[in-house]
Image: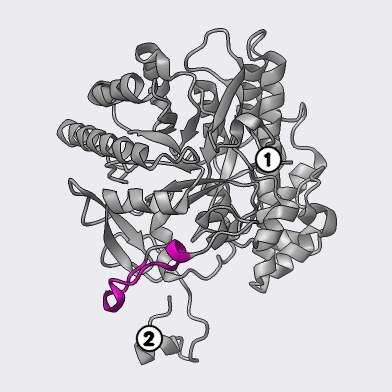
Amino acid sequence: MTVDNQNLESGAMRFEVIKAALKGGAAARLGRLAFARRLPIDTPNYMGVTSRGALPHLTPDNVSKHLETTGAYMALEDFIERPQQYAKRTPPIYETPTTTKHNTRLHSFTALPQSVTTVLSARRLPAVASPMGNTNASVSVFTSTGFQVLTTKEYLSAVKTLTPDIAIPPADLTHSPITPNSKRALRMAERTDEWVVDWFSELSDSNNPRISTFAPVLPVSYSIQWEYISRLAEDYLPTSQLSGLAIYDADLLPDLAEHCAALVPLPRLSLADPPTPHHILRQITLGIDLFALPFINTISDAGLALSFTFPPPTTTNTSSVSESSSSCTGGPSPLAIDLSLPAHATSLLPLTPNCTCYACTSHHRAYIHHLLSAREMLGWTLLQIHNHAIMSAFFAGVRSMLAQGVAQEGNFDEAVRRFTLAYEPEFPEGVGQRPRARGYQYKSVGGGEGRRNKPAWSKLDGKAQDEEDGRIEA
């Protein structure tokens, strides 16, 4: 059901903390986030990460029928490719008409269900590091036709045109695993501060309450960006221009709670890209409300079916779980099952025990194994449906545990401890072949990269035909 609240008819966002820990500040909490004409989001929760506006391997009707995802993270760089010969062509997404069924251009162009909350940022998650870097008035984005410059004014104009439910202002990020030095970090904070000031100044003139701004909190120490964060609390929170925070490093939440308590009631969206459910639980204990989770797409592409629950079962390594692992019994259970392994070729078990998703109730492991071996796209579609169902159940379990004991007996903390002991710390690597990658999916790191896609066929002497012809297949 969609939100039917008179106070939300104007499009304004509402976030309510239902239950918080007694220690307050940086701690787990229950909440609800609501927008007009969208499904309310009970937090903690997650949203799907899209590729070119779509959840990978899933059509919009599959999203409506089989997924409980209430939000979708999108990147503007997915939509604005401009080949040099058509440099002045307007990207089609800006000219998409709205309809009664899809009331924003973003929903209309992507055909996402009207109930799904949209989040728009300039870069993908995780973003590809640019060799050009950012400037004082622009960010470098990676489109399907290569790296291009996107000015902050162009990005803001796009936000006004597309009208996402949540917009994330541009941030001066390096998108590199290397920690920036203090001088570069200070420049990141100063530049982001300047961009956010311009953002609120121009967005206020448009008078569009439908767009909720989640200001970025940079992955640098609080002492470096304290002036920028203080401005958010003092200048934009009292005027209701600031709706939430986009956190790139959850470890900053204790500093925020201690030094800038005015921002504590705001919803917090994690863009820190947690690689496993263990990292998700840790961020929840610090007070994160929403997550964008790229690893779901990566796990499905690898032919893996998620196989964890929260709270964990009291006895692990049951016969059904042990069969899903290629290792011997004893020790922690795997976080996912590799359905590419030959052991599943004749298994009539569901992907995971007790799962009620469409993939598990309608098909079995042997069928998914066959689809992956034949490289049929349906295999990855069914895995996506299953993996999203597992994540939805995981967060439902988190909310249930928080409701039982977040402020009383530490039930949630004990469940987190048991989960850490019950499951392996990392996902299995996956031995199956991935779907064929397109050019915009390559994570370019410069020269000398090998080809990700294997040749479709080769000559008897072992040389690929496309190598002989000089063709490169992307």
Q: Which residue is painted at 30% across and 59% down in the image?
A: 445
Quadrant location of the C terminus in the rendered image: bottom left
**Is tag 1's residue or tag 2's residue first in the polypeptide sequence?**
1
Residue 265 vertical placement versus 384 (above, below):
above
In the rendered image, the residue lying farthest to the left is 183
Q: Element under label 1?
A: helix
- The image quadrant that residue 338 belongs to is bottom right
Q: Which residue is mark 2?
A: 471
Quadrant location of the N terminus in the rendered image: top right
Q: Which residues are magenta?
A: 81-95
**Is residue 261 visible to us here?**
yes
Using residue 330 as the reference point, say whether residue 22 is left or right of it: left
Q: Which mark is residue 392?
A: 1
From the viewer's side, name the closer residue of 11 and 365: 11
Q: Where's residue 210, x and y in %? A: 50, 40
Using residue 360 as the reference point, say whether residue 207 is left or right of it: left
Alpha-carbon neighbours of circle 1 within 10 Å: few (<14), some, or many (≥20)? some
Using residue 277 as the reference point, say whether residue 138 is left or right of it: left
Residue 190 vertical placement versus 142 (above, below):
above
- Name the mark nearer the viewer: 1 or 2: 1
Q: Where's residue 473, x and y in %? A: 43, 79
* The stretch drawn in magenta includes residue 405: no
From the viewer's side, name the closer residue of 234 and 129: 234
Please, what is the three-letter code of the amino acid marked with disc 2? Arg
Q: Where's residue 369, x and y in %? A: 72, 64
Alpha-carbon neighbours of circle 2 within 10 Å: few (<14), some, or many (≥20)? few
Q: Where's residue 177, x and y in %? A: 32, 43
Count of labels shown? 2
Q: How is the image coloured?
A: one colour
**Is residue 327 visible to us here?**
no
